Amino acid sequence: MGNLLKSELFKLRKDRSLWTLIIILTASAIFYPALIFFDNGADSATVNELFTNTGLGGNNYVVKLVPCILAGFFISSEYSVGTMKSIVASGNSRVRSYFAKLITFSIGAIIISVVFPIIIMAASMIFFGNNDLPTLDYFVQTMGLTILYAAAFASIMSLFSIIFTDSGKTIGFLIIFFLLFDSIFYLLSQEFALIKTIFNYSVFKLFLDINKVHLSNSAFLKLLLVPIITWIVFGMAGSLIFRKKEIK
Amino acid sequence: MNEYVLKTNQLSKKYKQQLALNKVNLSIQKGAIYGFIGQNGAGKSTLIRIVSGLAFPTGGTVELFGKTTEDDLVEARKRIGTMIEGPALYPQMTAAENLEAHRLLKGIPGKDCVGKLLALVGLQDTGKKKAKNFSLGMKQRLGLAVALLGDPEFLILDEPINGLDPMGVVEIRELLKKLNREYGITILISSHILSELHLLATHYGIIHKGELLEQVTAQELNDKCQQFLHIKVDNPNKAATVIETDLSTTDFEVMPDGVIKLFTYVDVPGKVSSILMKQGLIIEQFMPMGEDLEGYFMTRIGGVNRG
């Protein structure tokens, strides 16, 4: 497993799509507070506001949509360039190969998911000073939960990426899936009690709660456990699919 | 006793209604260079993909280094190197980075092997050039270097000389011979370039429509390569009629250039020539010849009745 992880991490470091996405997100996170500062002045916003409303609020889309691009290039493209054949024929079990891929992709998705809020906070501190910062507890809580939910979504993305054998199809499908699935899931939950229960305990619903300042212990536990269970369940499902998949 | 690197037992593969492999019993001895011959869609790649773990059989078993269970086969694949249906490369990486990614994947300690393999396949000077900018021949050579990582005991190469220039073909042939001779690496190689395979292989397997028609050694093949009389006359149509009626045989072929290949009466050429001349035919060329690998292959897949 160690050699598989080393190989996947090496490939992730060399993945141009990851670096391109990080650069775009970093640039956006720097330019947004800069524009506010130059347009409206130093008193027009606070670090806390920018971190909570823009950094975390805007990051809802980043966490669910931007890693879809990485999934296409990092996972599905292994089929199209033929390297999936080397991975499968390398003498490592397919389940381990899949989990090495999933763990590494999750790391990539996590990096993408924390870049925007962290950089926007840092840039805001430069432009608007150190007044009205978010508390350390709140920062750690939201970033920690962002990491967990990014990994959970990565697990779902990984499952679909291993099914499709073309990066374009994967990216297109995943973006449409993550754009529409919330709404469809929500509408169905209004009609069927079982689906409502599933929706309420799904990462799609709970992800919207990670910005809340005050959380009860049970709510916090739910926010912690659901993404972990999601990662494991979708990881196992993906590994089973990959185990049975014929590599063309 | 012969030691086998690979054996398949009644190996079958069915895709929906199409039988891609039909009860194939193939065996490759340790130290052999096994030339695997067949038309497109004959089942070569399907068999190679099953042995490499990319596809699953619908019947029969694979025995790799004597291992047959699923877990043991996965472990046994650490001892093989593969290049299947083209080189598997990361286009955005350099040659050295491609080898490094595969070195890590296979868990090979030390980076020394990367430089050595690049030198072995003649890509040591490619520097920062990315694999996507390589010529097809360079990609093939890099694919071969990837397959050689970890000093495999068994190399599986599917069309390794595709796209190589004549010099490259000779280099790869000599390299494979060297690997086989000096390091004892067993090689399974499929190629459409049969003349090239003829210069390399020590054993052959001929597959057609999913069935393994024959396995022969190079020596047996040379013995078997069918002899025929090469006849060129002024009127091939008339000659064909004469052969059918006067020699009572249909075991001949009329080639597009008018040459007749007569597969019987090889030991009595005088009888043939005298009958042709009696019928007023002018003989321009008349000599006994033997088939090459290509001719033998065509004979085997086409059946024996040419008439």
Image (cartoon, grey):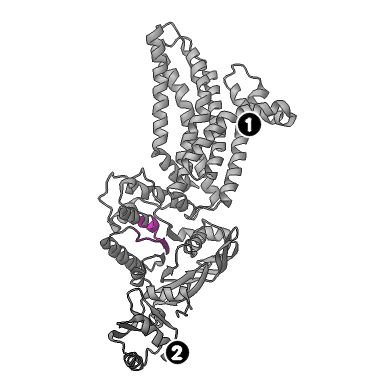
Dot 1 lies on which element? helix
Kind of residue at badge 1: Val
Q: Is residue B263 visible?
A: no
Name the subunit of mark 1: A
Q: Residues within 10 Å of mark 2 (few under 14, many from 20)?
A: few
Q: Tell me: residue A214, above or below residue A186.
A: above
Give the percent coordinates (x, y) of residue B46: 50, 61
For the point 39% across and 10% down, which residue is it? Answer: A37
Name the subunit of mark 2: B
Kind of residue at badge 2: Ser
Q: Is residue B250 visible?
A: yes
Q: Which one is nearer the viewer's eye here, A246 or A59?
A: A246
Q: Which one is nearer the viewer's eye here, B150 or A115?
A: A115
Disc 1 from disc 2: Cα separation: 85 Å
Residue A101 placement, left or right of A241 = left
Q: Which quadrant holds residue A219?
A: top right
Q: Residues within 10 Å of mark 1 (few under 14, many from 20)?
A: some
Residue B148 in magenta?
A: yes
Q: Tell me: residue A132, above or below residue A17.
A: above
Residues in magenta, as a range: B144-162
Q: Which one is nearer the viewer's eye here, B165 or B252?
A: B252
Give the percent coordinates (x, y) of residue A77: 45, 44
Dot 2 lies on which element? loop
For the point 44% across and 87% down, which residue is it? Answer: B249
Q: Tell me: residue B293, above or below residue B134.
A: below
For the point 35% across and 59% down, which residue is it? Answer: B162
Q: Tell me: residue B280, above or below residue B9.
A: below
Residue A54 in magenta?
A: no
Q: Are marks 1 and 2 in contact (CB under 8 Å)?
A: no
- Numbered label attached to residue A226: 1
Label 2 sits on residue: B248
